[in-house]
Image: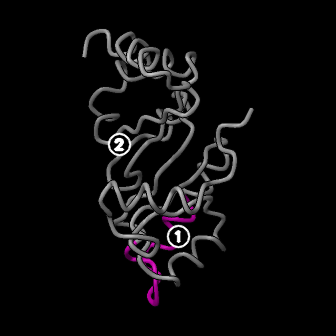
Amino acid sequence: QPNFVEKLIQSRAENGIEAAVLKLELTEVLLNNEAVGCKTILQKLNAFGVRVALDNFGAGQAALSTLTQLPLHQLKISQSLVQRLGPSNSSEAAVQAVIDIADTLGLQVVAEGVETAQQRDLLAAMGCDYAQGYLFSRPVPVADFEAFWAAHPPPALLAS
């Protein structure tokens, strides 16, 4: 979208949101199709302090050389890989490779679609930084989320 970065910066300023708390996610498929255009936009966002995550990594065919050229902050492991973790461990090597790549590039790693304690424990043992999925919560209405957030505030994420 033309002027995306400028529109984002303007919207952020109008709404009083710190750039450092923004995280945009782009899919691996978009990266493959729009790598050249994405790089310029991501560099502008990075300079402004916005963090960028590559979502659904491992489901597509993103080139490793492309990953090294982009100002990313986080890789999100595809649910399709995480779902195969378990008794057969059919994707354990692939997940470990993604975690190792992310570590080498200095990126945080989030596993998507974690549904069992076994998956969570295996991912933690493999060095995965974060996990999300139904094991932790199903989607909830905004009011329920706000009530939970009020009762269980996170650590000082915004503290400098």
Placement of 36 over or under 95, stated as above or below: above
Front position in the image: 48 or 62: 48
Q: CA distance from mark 1 to mark 2?
A: 20 Å
Residue that lies at the very extreme toward the right in this rendered image:
160
Position of the C terminus, as image quadrant, is top right
Could you tell me which residue is drawn at 52 percent across and 84 percent down? 118
Label 1 sits on what residue type? Ala
Kindly identify which numbered label has been placed on residue 93: 1
Could you tell me which residue is drawn at 48 percent across and 65 percent down? 94
* Contact between labelled residues 2 and 1, with CB atoms less than 8 Å apart: no
- The residue pinned by badge 2 equals 28
Looking at the picture, how far across and down is residue 100, in whole percent? Answer: 62, 56
Q: Who comes first in sequence, dot 1 or dot 2?
A: 2
Could you tell me which residue is drawn at 43 percent across and 54 percent down? 146
Placement of 104 over or under 44, stated as above or below: below
Looking at the picture, how far across and down is residue 144, in whole percent? Answer: 37, 62
Q: What's drawn in magenta, residue-wise?
A: 83-97
